[in-house]
Image: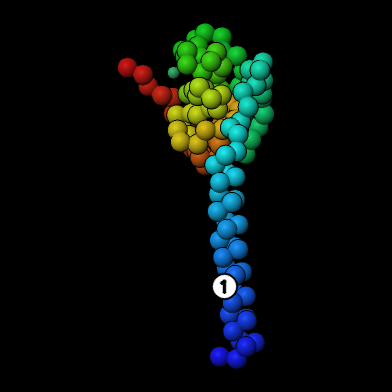
Amino acid sequence: MSNITRRRALGVAAGAAGAAAGIALAGSAVADAPRPAVPAAGPTSFDEVYQGRRIKGGPAHGGHHGGHHGGGYSVTIDGEELHVMQNADGTWISVINHYEPVATPKALARAAVRELQGAPLVPLTLS
Ligand SMILES: [Cu+2]
């Protein structure tokens, strides 16, 4: 092996090691990232059309669910209630997005709309 080739080989190896270290650092940065902050005054109301669906959210006013575990907050998609729950860390999940906590009920409603892909929201039947 000539000196030039050998130097190149070492350079490539060092570069690869550096890249691996960079990935490891990036991974730990993600793991240490703070969770979404809990809004001090609670989530704000919203009312918009997202991907052709009417999504609304706001303080619950009794009724079927009454926000019993949504922190007093209810979300609807085309008028049908989306079962939402607020986690202890302030993030939100819905019956449609169990495993993808999001920062706000609005983000949750949008995620549900994307997940539904145009299908109607079937009301959750509680026995
Ligand atoms: Cu419920």
Give the answer, above or below, for where 102 lies relative to 68: below
Please give the count of numbered marks on the rendered protein.
Answer: 1
**Nearest the eye: 34 or 92:** 34
Q: In this image, 83 relative to 4: left or right?
A: left
The C terminus is located in which quarter? top left
Up the image or down, 105 lies above or below 31; here it is: above
Residue plotted at (51% across, 18% down): 70
Task: Report the residue that reaches farthest toward the front.
Answer: 3
Q: Residue 38 or 54: which is nearer the viewer?
A: 38
Residue at figure coordinates x 67%, y 15% from the top left: 41
Q: Is residue 54 visible?
A: no
Q: Quadrant of residue 98?
A: top left
User: x, y (%) of residue 23?
Assistant: 57, 56
Name the residue located 47 percent from the left edge and 16 percent from the top edge. Answer: 69
Residue closer to the observer: 17 or 29: 17
Q: Nearer the viewer, residue 120 or 94?
A: 94
Q: Which residue is mark 1?
A: 13
Query: What percent of the width, then of the height, locates residue 32?
Result: 57, 39
What residue type is disc 1 on? Ala
Where residue 48 sits in the image (x, y, percent)? 67, 29
Vertical relation: 86 (above or below) 99: above
Quick check: which quadrant has ligand 1? top left
- Residue ID at (52%, 33%): 101
Residue 27 is at least partly visible in this image: yes
**What quarter of the picture does the N terminus occupy?**
bottom right
Q: Is residue 31 above or below residue 46?
A: below
